Amino acid sequence: MRNFLLFVYLLKGLFLFAQVSPQRIDTTAAAECKTSLYTEFKKKFEVVNKNITYSNSAERNIIKEVFNETQNEFLERIKNGEFLCNSDVNPYLQGIFNEILNKNNINTADYKILLSKDSEVNASNLGNGIVVLNYGMFLALDNEDELAFVISHEVGHQFLNHVKNQIENFAKISTSEDIIKKTKEIQKQKYGKATKANDLLKTIVYQNYSQRRKKEIAADSLGLVFYKKTLRNPKAALAILEKLDTVDEEKDSLSVKDYKAFFEKTDFKIKDKYFTEEESLFKQYDGERRLHIDSLKSHPDCAARIKLVQNMIQNPLQEKVTVSKAFTEIKQHSIYQNLFNLYSQKQYGPSLYESLKLYKNDKANTFYKSIIYLNLQEIYKSRRNYTINRYVQSYDKKQNTASENRFITFINNIQITDLEIITTTFKPS
């Protein structure tokens, strides 16, 4: 995690002061943040592991392995600086968290909320009282009440022990006689083992997916009960679910004409061939859609969940939306913060793509110019070092929009010498 004071200083020095900077966020020393969180959760996991109970030895081995993997992955996320520490924002989020817990007589000592750099519109319950809110969630939220319901939903997951139950259910399925029998049959196969193993994996995944659908509805239902105790506007729950139902729809796009408007000068022209897709190069990405990964924004049956919430808020206690200065300030900086979060995580492709879409409609914005230049610099270096795939997303006809694939094609096809030229287009004079 880079120090934002250094970043803001860089922008001020190079770009004559960005109109709006994310300097308010993440000013706490990164090293102290990581050390404190790592120590706290390492101790927490040691206590958790001592208190785990097992039904039998076969399930015990799987449960222990899953817990160890998830805990080590979480600690690695802390070491990599994924979580933001700020003396204003973190206490603000924990305050809303504690408000919900206190109103429902739940022990606040057992819960903690963390703010992730992740720009995906999402929140998650990791079990053991840990709730993670992605900074990207603020891109979808319009007020503090919506934020409170998102947190209430995750408290619902924790209160119902969904993570623990899911791990135990996975262990039961994996050690069931039916799965063991099918696994042995696959091992005896002379041909097509990989295909059959993949089909079996899908069966297990989609069984879990069906269970997740029920858990999401349960978390909505209980989360709304928790939320109502805060006496906040119940309709905020409905509003955020309706937004999440369409959050994956890309709201803007980039055309070839846009790229020419961004980068062309009198003595330099963008070549049309840079946008030509080569089937032989990208066909490996055109296969079957990848297995769906559960997340808040893509929870199944959103329409059914919306209907459930509608039925539960037919007689709302009050209609007034909570106006919060703290939320307003975070929301105001969320676009800028998320662009820089992508950059600081070395996701230069996504950061550049999102920056260009915003810059298209606000060419006077010096922050957009700044972040575009920084991303182009890194992409230029990666092209020269043949490491572009580490920093730019993959071409994918199934998962990406046409605009996203056009961007990826352009970044991969453009000559390095021309990439250097367009980078200088955004270099401060």
Image (cartoon, helix red, strand yellow):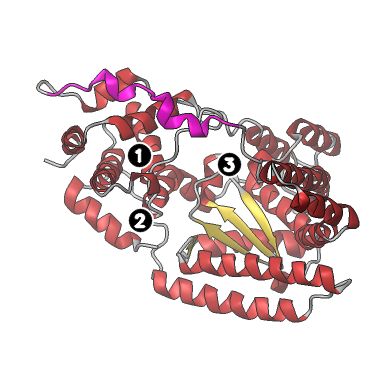
Q: Which sits earlier in the primary sequence, circle 1 or circle 3?
A: 3
- Proximity of marks 1 and 2: CB atoms separated by less than 8 Å: no
Check disc 2 and report the residue beneath it. 23
Viewer-side label of 1, 2: 1
The foreground one among 22 and 7 is: 7
Residue at 38% from the left image edge and 33% from the top image edge: 408
The answer to whether residue 275 is magenta is yes
Q: Which sits earlier in the primary sequence, circle 3 or circle 2?
A: 2
Check disc 3 and report the residue beneath it. 141
Determine crowd level at label 2: few under 14, some 14-19, many 20+ residues with C-alpha closer than 10 A: some
Q: Can residue 157 be seen here?
A: yes
SS under mark 1: helix
SS under mark 3: loop
Mark 1 vs mark 2, CA separation in Å: 20 Å
Q: What stretch is highlighted in magenta?
A: 268-287
Three-letter amino acid code of the residue under disc 2: Gln
How far across and how far down the image is residue 294, in percent?
Answer: 68, 45
